[in-house]
Image (cartoon, rainbow, N blue to C red):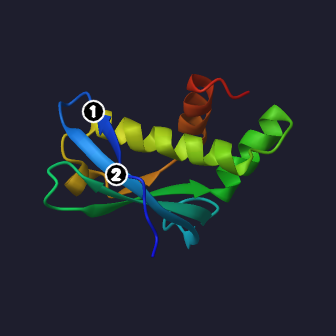
Amino acid sequence: MTIRRLKTYTGSQGYVYQYYFVGKRPAAVSGAKGSDANEYIFDVTSDRKLTYAVSIFLPHQIVAGWAEAHGRPLVDSEQYAAVKMRLFRAFDELEEVQTQGRQLLIDLQSLEESLATLGVE
């Protein structure tokens, strides 16, 4: 039996989200250049009644582009941190995460911004 740590985040829209990390798996992203990615899955609720999955895709090509630009690879914990920052951005920016933010893609610009916010160079 897996025990997951439920975390809380208050978004700028006024909703209080509870979420936990479910896992990571290889995935293909349709319509994205270089379609191989890692899919990070979170279970999310904003009302404690309905829980839904939010998938965040981090394409391998984007990670490779960041590594080339910075001269070093991103370690797993840095990738996870960028993914979590993308989840938080969805909580802050989207009116309805359940309907508008179930599948989120990280591009190079958002990866750079997330990691810069965290002080990762």
Q: Residue at x 19, y 46 (%)?
A: 96
First in sequence: mark 2 or mark 1?
1
User: How far across and how far down the image is residue 100, in percent?
Assistant: 25, 52
Outermost residue toward the bottom in this view = 1
- Considering depth in this image, is 13 or 106 the residue closer to the camera? 13
Q: Residue at x 29, y 47 (%)?
A: 18
User: How far across and how far down the image is residue 62, in percent?
Assistant: 66, 49
| Residue type, numbered disc 1 | Gly
C-alpha distance separating marks 2 and 1: 12 Å
Q: Does the image show residue 107?
A: no
Q: Is residue 20 left or right of residue 28?
A: left
Q: Is residue 56 above or below residue 81?
A: below
Residue 11: which numbered mark, if any? Answer: 1
10 Å neighbourhood of mark 2: few (<14), some, or many (≥20)? many
Q: Residue at x 55, y 32 (%)?
A: 114
Quadrant holding the C terminus: top right
SS for dot 2 = strand
Q: Is residue 26 above or below residue 111?
A: below
10 Å neighbourhood of mark 1: few (<14), some, or many (≥20)? some
According to the picture, the residue beneath numbered tag 2 turns out to be 19
| Residue type, numbered disc 2 | Tyr
